[in-house]
């Protein structure tokens, strides 16, 4: 048996800058592409890791909403930080989005991103509501 993939689309979502989808529904799961701290309405990169973390998670919430899910249904995230010294600041904002148990499982790794101003990227897996 093969699961069909369905593209997640919405006018609220940024158009991908490469050959990838912002989100895919497969079975009972929604997978998001990595989201940066860019406001999708203005195209502006937010300043600093706290503002970028908040924007990443808002972008993920928009993708999940367009798919028929929500941030409350996230089961896994991967966080890519350019500087692990910013881990505490990222966690401060992240914990406001995931403040009830059970919290999603998470991996956090240090990675270089597209430009030095980009401090964080986050992707997520959620179940359909």
Image: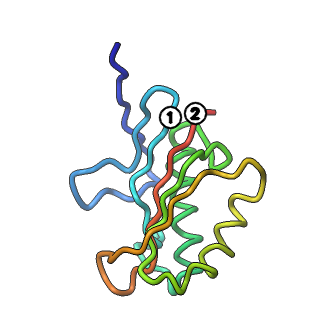
Q: Quadrant of residue 16?
A: bottom left
- The residue at the point 47 percent across, 72 percent down is 37
Find numbered disc 1 in the image and state the secondary structure of the residue it sits on.
strand
| Residue under label 1 | 29
Residue 75: x and y, percent? Answer: 59, 45
Point out the image quarter for the C terminus: top right
Q: Residue at x 73, y 47 (%)?
A: 102
Q: Is residue 47 above or below residue 31?
A: below
Instruction: Determine the CA span between mark 2 and mark 1.
Output: 6 Å
Q: Nearer the viewer, residue 20 or 82?
A: 82
Q: Position of residue 17 (x, y in %)?
A: 26, 61
Position of residue 48 in the picture relative to residue 14 (left or right): right
Residue 111: x percent and y percent?
Answer: 36, 74
Q: Residues within 10 Å of mark 1 (few under 14, many from 20)?
A: some
Instruction: Residue at the far left: name it.
Output: 19
- Residue 94 at what x, y percent from top left? 64, 67
Q: Which mark is residue 79?
A: none
* Quarter of the N terminus within the rendering: top left
What residue is pinned by disc 2?
128
């Amino acid at each position: 048996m093969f699961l069909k993939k369905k593209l997640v689309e919405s006018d609220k979502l940024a158009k991908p800058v490469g050959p990838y989808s912002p989100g895919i529904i497969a079975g009972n799961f929604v997978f998001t592409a990595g989201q940066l701290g860019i406001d999708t309405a203005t195209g502006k990169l937010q300043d600093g890791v706290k503002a970028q973390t908040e924007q990443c998670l808002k972008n993920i919430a928009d993708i999940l909403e367009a798919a028929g899910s929500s941030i409350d249904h996230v089961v896994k995230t991967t966080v890519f930080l350019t500087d692990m010294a910013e881990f505490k600041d990222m966690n401060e904002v992240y914990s406001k989005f995931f403040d009830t148990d059970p919290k999603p499982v998470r991996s956090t790794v240090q990675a270089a991103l597209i430009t030095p101003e980009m401090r964080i990227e986050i992707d997520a897996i959620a179940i359909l509501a």
